[in-house]
Amino acid sequence: MEFTPEQEMLRESVRAFAAKEMPDGFAREWDIKGEPPLETYQRFADAGFMGVGIPEQYGGQGGGIVEVAIVLHELSRAMMSFAIMVYRSAIHASGGLQIYGTEEQRERFLPGIASGQYKFCFSLSEPDAGSDAFNLKCRAVRDGDQYVVNGTKMWNSFARHADYVLLATRTSDEPKKQDGITFFVVDLSSPGIEITPVETIGERASGTNMVAYTDVRVPAANILGTEGQGHRNLQANLERERFSSLPINLGPMEAILEEAIEYANTREQFGQAIGRFQAIQHMLADVAVDVNIARTLTWDLARRIAAGEQCALEVSMAKLWISEAMMRASYTGMQVMGGYGYTLDSNMQLHWRNARLGTIGAGSSEIQRNIIARQIGVGRNPS
């Protein structure tokens, strides 16, 4: 798609920020630390980028999904984990509040997201509820003008550093599992919350956690949307998450291709640069094709979503394809760079480890195939 002059200016500004604040080696440094660069996050917010998708009346810049995708794409080229930290607030929280929040909630939280004062995370998965997303056991019970929350959540990324969480709970037992689900905005400093880091092989800077809730009191005013109808929030959140994975994977795919080409053109073996061997040329040609397709899918869907089209099927298709293309690209990059790519001094090993999450998180590749098959009518009973 063609970008407007304002969108091109945004792209250039975010790329300049990333080049200055997240130079080569920055992502590897924070990955090894297993910590997020919170000071850089605040500088990012101070520059106005956290408010790109927030209306001006709440302290934002009034952009839409295309502008947010531009931000995520440019950030992920430099540091995928940083882009993921940003999207938790810029997509999950900001989007949820704008669509389902009350005016009081929007006024209370959106300016803080835009300024960097409030950092959000999103919590759905549990020990027995992963791909079976509606099988929630974390329960919220009404007690006057509050709810009391008990339960355990898994894979709660960035929770250790966030201020608030969008928490999916069960508030009633209904015949259909998707009914009786309610979302809350929960202050993570509330008494009764215990956060335990979970070590992972990738996305270590943003990190993930197990979070236990024991008699945690949440104001009824913090319900996001309608009580018992949280499955609607959830479906919209997951679609936004799947779309966000497109620019977040596109950025590293481009970086992989650029880094592998540079290495192939400078690394000499058998008296010539390895890029002169047809085997290497074909490997990188395949990555270039995947990158081009990923760009087309990402920006076409951004345009269609911005125009108000319903694209749930196409988003699942694109998420499936791009996450698996990212896996292919990172594998090829590692193979081209050989032993150097396998060292912690290389960006390629970080791309390779981070890529593995793409086919698991935001709905695994198998779940995306289930969604696609259902949408195209496979398995229906004959009428």
Image (cartoon, grey):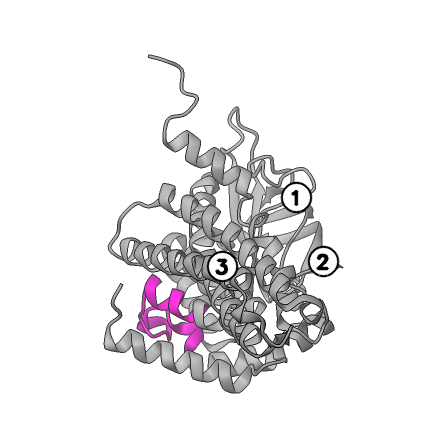
Q: Nearer the viewer, mark 2 or mark 3?
A: 3
Q: Residues within 10 Å of mark 2 (few under 14, many from 20)?
A: some
Of the image marks 2 and 3, the number of the one nearer the N terminus: 2
Q: Nearer the viewer, residue 295 or 57?
A: 295
Mark 2 belongs to which amino acid?
Answer: Thr
Of label 1 and label 2, which has the lower sequence position?
1
> To which quarter of the image does residue 95 belong?
bottom left
Q: Residue furthest top?
A: 383
Q: What residue type is disc 3 on? A: His
Residue sitting at x 37%, y 81%:
12
Question: Mark 3 = which residue?
Answer: 282
Residue at 51%, 48% (x, y): give it: 183
Image quadrant in which the N terminus is located: bottom left
Mark 1 surroundings within 10 Å by alpha-carbon count, few (fewer than 14), some (14 through 19), many (20 or more): many
Q: Mark 2 — residue?
A: 200
Name the kind of residue labelled 1 in the image. Answer: Glu
Q: Is residue 45 magenta?
A: no
How far across and how far down the image is residue 372, in percent? Answer: 42, 36
Residue to which mark 1 is pinned: 126
Foreground tag (1 vs 3): 3
Q: CA distance from mark 1 to mark 3?
A: 43 Å
Q: What's the magenta region? A: 49-72
Name the element at disc 1. Answer: loop
**Residue 55 lies in magenta, yes or no?**
yes
The residue drawn where x is 54% and y is 80% is 42
Specify whether 171 is left or right of 108.
right
The secondary structure type at the circle numbered 2 is: loop
Residue 4 badge: none
